Each structure stands twice: as structure tokens, then as C-alpha cells.
Amino acid sequence: MPNDHAGRYIYRERMMLLPGLRVLLPLALLTACATSPEPRDVSDKPYHHTPTGFRNAEGSPRRATTHGFSDRMKFLWKRIIMQRETPEIPADHVLPRQQALADLAAHTANPTITWLGHAAFLIRMGGKNVLTDPYLKKYASPLGPLGPARYAGPGLKVAELPPIDVVIVSHNHYDHLDEATIEALPNKDRITVLAPLRLGDFFRERGYKNVRDVDWHDKVTFGELSVTALPAVHWSRRGLNDINQTLWMGAMLEADGRRLYFSGDTGYGPVFGELGRRYGPFDLALVPIGAYRPVWLMKTSHTNPEEAVQLGRDLKARTLLAHHWGTVVLSDEPPFEPPQRFRAAARAAGFDDDDAWIMKIGETRDLPAAK
């Protein structure tokens, strides 16, 4: 046993977690970092619909066959049991709560975006307050302390959010759909939820009255705001027997002459070139830059920073905003490596620093002007 006080604390914490290893088996299946099997083809429905659930767009990357279940168990043992130390957080990474509130209040003249951490954003456009991928609580796991926990607090607490009009959920993984946050949101009778196919019941069962289950390319209008569900390269699972039973998606938001892209969680694939040709250009693209190592596990469901920049280029985006980093440890790369690589990749791709946003958690910015 370690002799120093800190070492003894970490040792005791890990020993307390050992009884929970009996749940590592289901956790290996639930982790949002894993990949899913390819269902068989079906000819009488859209390509991404199958008799056993859903799948990614044609041509999307497929999971590696050189690593199996034992490799995922080793990853979980290392990441969840043996490496639970909190990363050192740069002083300017998270705005102090009062400063975040003041920043939000100061931006009222134009449509705005506020980063709440990970893939959670407050977007104010078209006269609506939109909340994406609501994960504002501590744990990104059904197993509480046995799973990933956020090390950086949310930009705003649920009670500090303005009245939410629309919730957009990209998929059902725990770091994007947090039951505690969903339960805590007030005014469930006035919020409209946009959920991928078959995920809507999650919200109906928790008291939400206005829920729209959408397929890729479905468009829903809320007064001046319209939201179109877009393909993403990912997968879904929330329990032991529901792999790919609910769809996953990104979204396009249009209002005030602006076009904004929200990726949700995605890997890279040729589908983004198709989206750029069909829907581009975009004034702002929210692209995911974290959770990319080990490559054999993450490649098919998460973009690395360079792929995120290429995704933005495929969409013909004028401005990029990096997200899905700096909030919760899900993978093996150093927690604050992604923005450094993103900045370098964006510069190499011809983006000025003013057009490649790296926001502080809690920061609010005006949306880019429409062009």
C-alpha cells in the first residue's frame, strides 16, 4: 500500500471500487466510446434503417476487427478504475459563475451561443432558447461514481438557464443525454423536444408533452426557427439490449438569415461532403474535437481535431466552434491536447483564428453574421 497520504487516499478509493467490477461487463457494453456491429442490409427502406435497428450512412467507417471485447475491458479497467485523478484545469478554461451570468446578460442584441461544456450549448436564435445535448450534472454513466465524471462544472446550472423552448438531443449516450438534467428542466409542458427516431419515449415518460421523433433530413419549424435532423456517424446504446434501437443525428438550425450546424457526436465519413453539397454553406459549424484515443476504439464514432476541421470544410462552414472536449475524461488523449491540435489544423486549412473558436465553458458569443 502507498505510504503517502494522497497515495493512500487513491488506493482506498480504488479498493472501494473493486466490488463494482461485477458491473464492468455491462459498462463495457454501455460505454459511449465503443463501437457497434453492422446490421444486415434491407432494401425496402432507407439505407440507415435495418430490421434490427439503425446504422450509419453508406460508406461510413466500420469498427476494427483486430480488437475484441477483452481489449475494451482493458481500456475500461485502465480508464475507470486505475486512472481516476482529476486533470489539472487551466485557470481560464471555465468562467466563474457570476461572470458567465453577466456574459449571458450582456449579449442580448444579437443571436448568441453559450458553451455549457461538452456538447451542451444554449443557442438563442429565431426568438427561441435552444438547449443541445443536455448533460449538466456530474456523472456520464448509469453507474454513478463507477463511470466517467465531469471535472469541469457546467457553464450554467439548470436553474440559471433562461426558459428553454427547444431541446435537441443527438443520441442516447449518457454524456449527451443526462436523465438528471432532463428531470430538472422546468416547464416540461412548453418545451418541444427534437429526438432521433424511437428516442422520444424517453422524454414522454418523464413528463414532456411536446416531443417530435425525427429521421434524418426531417425538418421542424418553430416560428422563425427551423431545425433539420442530419446524419451523423455514430451509434446508440443506453441499456444492455438496445444497441442501435434509437437513431443518432446532428442538426441544422436556420433563423435570422443564419445557418448553424450542430454535430452531436460523430466520426468522420463521406456523408459530410454530401451534406455540404445539399445544405451548405454554413455560417457556423459546431464540430467535436475530443475522445479520439485509442484510435482503434474511437475512430468509427469520434472525430479527432484534424478530422473535425475537415468535417467543417466538407460542410463549407465559414466559422468552426470546437466542442466535445474539456469536460469529462472519456478517452486516452491528454484532456487539453484537442484544442491545440484543432488550432493548428484550422490554421493549416486556411481558417483565421477568429474563424476557429475555442470557447471557455460558460462563455457567450454573438453568432457570426449571415453571409
Image: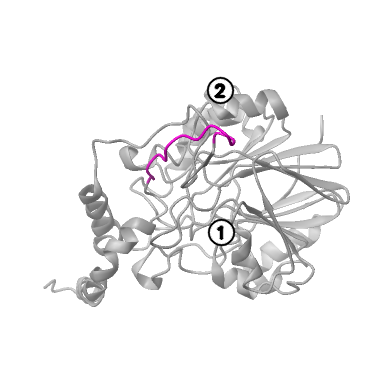
In the image, 246 versus 190, the foreground residue is 246
Give the labeled residue for mark 1.
Answer: 94
**Is the residue 355 above or below the residue 113 in the image?**
above
Q: Residue at x 38, y 58 (%)?
A: 30
The mark that comes first in sequence, 1 or 2, is 1
Q: Secondary structure at mark 1?
A: loop
Number of residue marks: 2
Residue 359: where, in percent of width, then height?
61, 48
Going by the numbered disc 1, the residue's amino acid type is Val
Residue 11: where, in percent of width, then height?
20, 72
In the image, 121 versus 366, the foreground residue is 121
In the image, 264 versus 366, the foreground residue is 264
**Label 1: few (<14), some or many (≥20) within 10 Å?**
many
**Is the residue 239 above or below the residue 304 in the image?**
below
Going by the numbered disc 2, the residue's amino acid type is Ala
Please give the range of residues in magenta.
35-47
Give the labeled residue for mark 2.
Answer: 349
* Residue 46, magenta (yes or no): yes
Q: Main secondary structure of the magenta part?
A: loop
Is residue 266 visible in the rendered structure shown here? yes
